[in-house]
Amino acid sequence: MIFKDYYKILGLENNKATPDEIKTAYREQAKKYHPDINSENNFSEERFKDINEAYKVLSTPVSRRKYDRMWNSNIGKKKKVEESKREEGSLFSNFFNMFFGEQLEEKQEKQKKKSKEKVAIKGENVETEIEVSIEEAFYGLDKKISLRAQNGKMKTFTVKIPAGIRNGEKIRLIGQGKKGENGGKNGDLLIRINIQDSKKYALRGIDLYTDLKITPWEAVLGTKVSVDTIGETIFLHIPKGIESGEKVKIPEKGYKDGMGGRGELIADVKIMIPKTPTKEEMEFFEKLNQVSTFNPRNNLE
């Protein structure tokens, strides 16, 4: 991936610019490279796209913070190294280097090697994942996990899973990753949370899905059924003539939305028939077959 220096694209020297300076720089560059002004220059059109892309990222605080981390890794560190090299070169005149250049270079190489050996290096992060049920994720819990450490021994961690955590979200245990070098900090342990669907519920975003099984006569006559939600049982009115595949939405009975509310519990209606009907039930269905004029296939073309 090619790293784009958005600050340079907007004509800014570094990432210390204020929001107003970024806006002013954007307006100047957009006016300068606008395709309407430079209609015969294909480069201007591409440049104009980069300018808009840069402003879109840098004008939003969240996206700018993420980008600045990349900028420091790709640009900031390189500038510091270049400045350091210039400072080293300015200490000695060309005349001195002409006589003692080889000795000086050898000395500098030794110093660089020595400094590298002493540079503190942070340890690598370690990533793993654990599975939790929908109910566990909804209420939150402390969960113990065991991982094999670098020395081959098993190490047990207690992971505090907050209530309402999202599926795929990661929990960071600071300093529990691989050991750092030369006094550097340890890496972190990143634990991805996988929320597993159960026989009763399926989680989709902040909504919960469940099957609502009813009998044919309940579907025809309408009824009131009990439905289990997380934390309570509610009673739900089923209207007359409901069909399989219809969905009944129950607000504020789904998963936590992270803002104090909940999503929906969506009940998927499934009309069930007895697999082993009794003699009386068979007689009833046979009589119904004789007297009923209903034929769902009449609606098919």
Image (spheres, grey):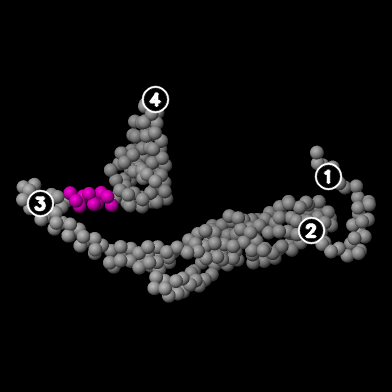
Task: Tell me what residue is drawn at x 76 percent, y 61 percent.
Answer: 225
Between disc 4 and disc 3, the foreground one is 3
> Which corner quadrant of the image does residue 152 belong to?
bottom left
- Which-is-in-front pick, marks 3 and 1? 3
Q: Earlier in the sequence, mark 3 or mark 1?
A: 3
Out of 208 and 88, give the one closest to the viewer: 88
Identify which amino acid the numbered label 1 is placed on.
Arg
Q: Main secondary structure of the magenta part?
A: helix
Q: Can residue 279 be seen in this view?
A: yes
Q: What whole-number distance in Å separates the C-alpha atoms at marks 1 and 4?
A: 63 Å
Q: Earlier in the sequence, mark 4 or mark 3?
A: 4
Q: Give coordinates of residue 116: x percent, y percent.
A: 24, 60
Q: Is mark 1 on a helix, strand or loop?
A: helix
The structure residue drawn at horizontal position 36% and vertical position 45%, both measured from the top left corner, is: 3
Q: Name the residue under label 1.
A: 297
| Residue 206: image location, x then y, percent | 59, 56
Q: What element carries label 2?
A: loop
The amino acid on which the numbered mark 2 sits, given as a three-letter code, is Met
Percent position of residue 258, x then y: 54, 58
Mark 4 in CB contact with mark 3 (< 8 angstroms): no
In the image, the segment drawn in magenta is: 77-86
Which residue lies most toward the top here?
40
Tell me the distance, in whole angstroms, between the alpha carbons under discs 3 and 1: 96 Å
Q: Quadrant of the C terminus?
A: top right
Residue underneath mark 2: 272
What residue would you read off at disc 3?
101
SS category of the residue bearing label 3 = helix
Q: Is 85 in the magenta? A: yes
Disc 2 to disc 4, C-alpha distance? 68 Å
Mark sitting earlier along the chain (2/4): 4
Residue at image mark 4: 39
